[in-house]
Amino acid sequence: MKGLPRSKKEGIIYGLFMCLFMVLVMSFLNITISNGGINSNSLIIFAQAFVPIYIIAFVVENLIARPINDLLMKKLHPEHDNSFAQVLCNGFFIATTMSIIMTIIGGLIGGESFEQVFTNFFITWPRNFCAAMFCNILIAGPLSRLILSTIQKSMDKKKKAKAQAKVSDSLQGEPTTANISADNSLDTKNSNNQSINKDAPLSEISKNTNTTQKVTKEIKEQDANINLTPQDIQAS
């Protein structure tokens, strides 16, 4: 089923909205009943008590109700069952634990003593359980899943966009076949030029050698002419 938490972060988001709608309905119901219906006095009390009740309910839900719910779900409800059965079981366990806790907390916040809270517990708790179950299944659960599914869609779109950006960057970084052939042709030209440059000094050395041999021969002939005697000059 869409809108169910897939991670701890999504579980916290889901719990925030679930607790918000549960406290909104249950606290409004209890305050209006205890103050004689919907009137200015009950609305003022509801506006003043909503924020502290919500904070207390969220802490209690995460520290007490959620661990108990997870334990019961693991023992009594197999994971391979369909998602609708999981939602029903989860709603039943959450409604049971939260209605018990909120009956006690709501009575204390409403000004009742511990004795009055426990005396009226079996009168007020069945009413709170029915209200919590109704709210969880028909109001808080669907709205929380709708909000979470919207958040999940936006998160999935961002992940896909990042993945596509990484793929495009990797494709741009890889050399194409045209670039490879161009690089190979350039390497071939460079290698040919290097071979030509290597052969050039050999031809120059041979030229220099021939020139040196000619100069040496001329020097030897000049030396021979210098060493001639007068008789050789007359004979010539």
Image: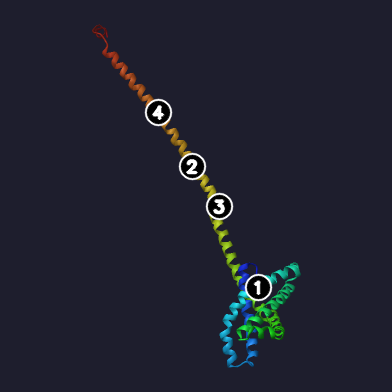
Q: Which residue is mark 3?
A: 176
Q: Nearer the viewer, mark 2 or mark 3?
A: 3
- The answer to which of marks 4 and 1 sits earlier in the sequence is 1
Q: Which mark is residue 189?
A: 2
Q: Are marks 3 and 1 in contact (CB under 8 Å)?
A: no
Along the viewing direction, whichever of 223 and 48 lies nearer the viewer:
48
Crowd class of label 2 (few under 14; some 14 to 19; many from 20; radius 10 Å): few
Residue 16 appears in view: no
Q: Residue at x 60, y 77 (%)?
A: 56
- The answer to which of marks 2 and 1 sits earlier in the sequence is 1
Q: CA distance from mark 4 to mark 1?
A: 96 Å
SS at mark 1 in the image:
helix
Q: CA distance from mark 3 to mark 1?
A: 60 Å
Q: Residue at x 62, y 70 (%)?
A: 10
Q: Which residue is mark 1?
A: 64
Image quarter of residue 62 = bottom right
Q: Nearer the viewer, mark 2 or mark 1?
A: 1
Q: Nearer the viewer, mark 3 or mark 1?
A: 1
Q: CA distance from mark 2 to mark 3?
A: 20 Å
Q: Position of residue 4 (x, y in %)?
A: 67, 71
Q: Residue at x 56, y 61 (%)?
A: 165
- The answer to which of marks 3 and 1 sits earlier in the sequence is 1
Quarter of the rendering occupied by the N terminus: bottom right
Above or below, 21 against 152 in this view is below
Crowd class of label 3 (few under 14; some 14 to 19; many from 20; radius 10 Å): few
